């Protein structure tokens, strides 16, 4: 990792990080909107670009962290502006993660209900000693196969 020693290098590093966060923010907003609208398959198409930008963001962030003292001395105003950009990015990222977690929980609930319904249908309807219907034993249910590809 190259040390940052001049104002031009500091500006360049901050510009690079800001540009990556802006591009990633656009992808996250697009993914959030798609998942929120129930278009999960379309949102999954964004994953490769998002992964590539996230890797670049990590590398660039590590360079910024390694040169934090130099950056604060060379470009204090730019560092303050970068902090604001990062805070906005974190808000967008939190919203994206909330939507993804909600979609995950909803789909998991659907699969669990489906599995329960299949178990009920596959077990015999009998009455127990109390005269009430006996719930199916979950150990004797059929396995449920789910394709994880979208």
Image (cartoon, rainbow, N blue to C red):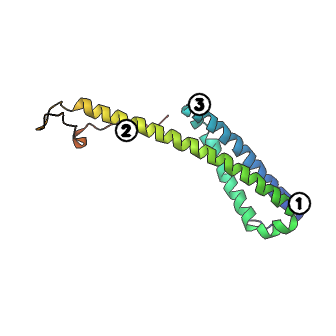
Residue at x-position 10% and y-position 38%:
129
User: Residue 37 shows which numbered tag?
Assistant: 3
Image coordinates for residue 98, horizontal then vertical, percent: 57, 45
Q: Which mark is residue 8?
A: 1
Residue displayed at 77% across by 67% down: 68
Q: Residue furthest front?
A: 130
Instruction: Check residue 64 in the rendering and tell me which mark sits there, or answer none.
Output: none
46 displayed left or right of 14: left
Residue 25 image-quadrant placement: top right
Front-most of 12 and 142? 142
Q: Earlier in the sequence, mark 2 or mark 1?
A: 1
Front residue of this view, candidates 85 and 146: 85
**Relative image position of residue 105 (x, y in whole percent):** 47, 41
Identify the secondary structure beneath mark 2.
helix
The answer to which image quadrant residue 30 occupies is top right
Looking at marks 3 and 1 on the same chain, the residue that comes earlier in the sequence is marked by 1
């Amino acid at each position: 990792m190259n040390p940052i020693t001049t104002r031009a290098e500091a500006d360049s590093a901050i510009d690079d990080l800001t540009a990556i966060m802006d591009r990633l923010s656009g992808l996250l907003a697009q993914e959030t909107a798609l998942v929120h609208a129930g278009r999960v398959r379309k949102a999954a198409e964004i994953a490769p670009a998002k992964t590539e930008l996230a890797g670049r963001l990590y590398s660039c962030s590590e360079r910024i962290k390694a040169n934090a003292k130099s950056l604060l001395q060379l470009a204090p105003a730019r560092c303050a502006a970068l902090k604001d950009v990062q805070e906005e990015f974190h808000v967008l990222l939190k919203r994206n993660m909330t939507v993804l977690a909600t979609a995950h929980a909803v789909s998991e609930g659907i699969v669990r209900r489906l599995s329960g319904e299949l178990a009920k249908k596959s077990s015999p309807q009998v009455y127990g000693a109390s005269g009430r219907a006996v719930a199916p034993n979950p150990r004797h249910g059929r396995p449920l196969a789910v394709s994880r590809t979208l």
